[in-house]
Amino acid sequence: MPFMKAVQISSPGGDFDLVEREIPEPEEGQVRIKVEACGVCHSDAYTKEGTLPGIKYPRVPGHEVAGFIDKVGERVTAWKIGQRVGVGWHGGHCFQCEPCRRGDFTTCKNRKIAGASYDGGYAEYMVAPQEALVSIPEELTATEAAPLLCAGITTFNALRNSGARAGDVVAVQGIGGLGHLAIQFANKLGFKTVALSRGKDKEVLARQLGAHVYIDTATVNVAEELTRLGGARVVLGTAPNAKVMADVVDGLAIDGKLLLVAGSSESLGVSSMPRSPIRDTCHLSSTTTKRIFSRNVSNVNPGLGQRFVPQ
């Protein structure tokens, strides 16, 4: 039996161990991928620390995988050997539960997570369910494609479904693994792109990525600066800092949205007092926990007519 190199976690909270393992064989409905690149995501810490329920160890992390199909299992007809493919966080679904029957595969009650439910891309080879695959075009290298399969799809989907239109002010909070991609997407989608980060050292990078405006959150009032720009139609929170996320709420335009794609264990404190006595509506949404709540204030008297609607 041939062997491969892999990096595994032997037990919750354990170290990354470089080991030799047998090259896995694909079962029915699966393919084997020769891994060319695998991004490192903060969510891999869930596998390392054992914070996701049901992980069986030893486990190989990695859910930003790019490579090509090396072997296919039985009943795999849509994918061919040699085809360039990738695997992201969504590692498979059952097709049978209620969300799947609605076509909402990402909320499948029995969904799998690559690198947690089964071994991921920190290895020379991995096996994945055929429904978890995406095709990678020849124009993208493996190292370019891999981060798009988690950080990329997270930020792109958030922006394209945000309701913002070309010309709207869209702010990206944080310029890390998520934020540096979000700025590029926002620029290409035609938004007036505002980058929010702490310190002046990130400004050059932010503008190179496509930001039209850079706001140093350490030296100015973010809400006031966004208001001077007309208010943000969307603020995309990509850095897990609850205080900074809360600070931007008053910089939203009427009917603006704060979208959270980076989770924080801290409480998010948002005042129910409207900024405007006429009408102030904002929506706070999270891709990690579904919608948090919607704040809708519509009354000529400040403090009256306020209601919180759990979603």
Image (cartoon, grey):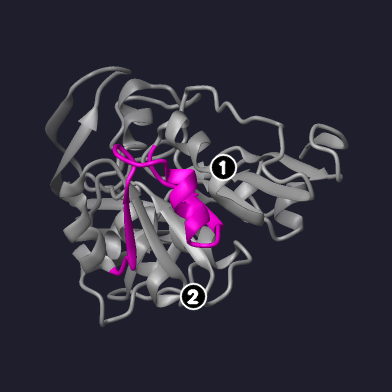
Q: Where is residue 126 in the image (x, y as percent from the top left)?
A: 29, 51
Is 271 situated above or below 207?
above
Q: In front: 102, or 163?
A: 163
Q: In this view, does 295 lie to the left or right of 135?
A: right
Pointer 1 residue:
249
Which residue corresponds to the image point at 12% horizontal and 33% vertical from the top-left? 19
Q: In this view, does 117 lie to the left or right of 284?
A: left
Amino acid under label 1?
A: Val
Which residue corresponds to the image point at 25% horizontal and 51% vertical from the top-left? 39
Q: In front: 300, or 271?
A: 300
Q: Does the magenta stretch include residue 225?
A: yes
Q: Which secondary structure, mark 2?
A: loop
The reply to whether residue 251 is in sight is yes
Q: Position of residue 272 (x, y in %)?
A: 71, 31
Which residue corresponds to the image point at 44% horizontal and 40% vertical from the top-left? 262
Image-quadrant location for residue 209: bottom left
Amino acid under label 2?
A: Ala
Q: Where is residue 76 in the image (x, y as percent from the top left)?
A: 48, 68
Q: Is residue 122 left or right of residue 69?
A: left
Is 167 situated above or below 153?
below
Is 119 situated above or below 35?
above
The reply to whether residue 68 is in sight is no
Mark 2, residues whose alpha carbon is within 10 Å: few (<14), some, or many (≥20)?
few
Q: Which span is picked out in magenta?
A: 210-239
Label tally: 2
Q: Is residue 172 magenta?
A: no
Pointer 2 residue:
78
Cβ–Cβ under 8 Å for marks 2 and 1: no
Q: Position of residue 36 (x, y in %)?
A: 19, 61
Whole-angstrom CA distance, mark 2 to mark 1, is: 46 Å
Q: Which secondary structure, mark 1?
A: helix
Q: In front: 136, or 56?
A: 136
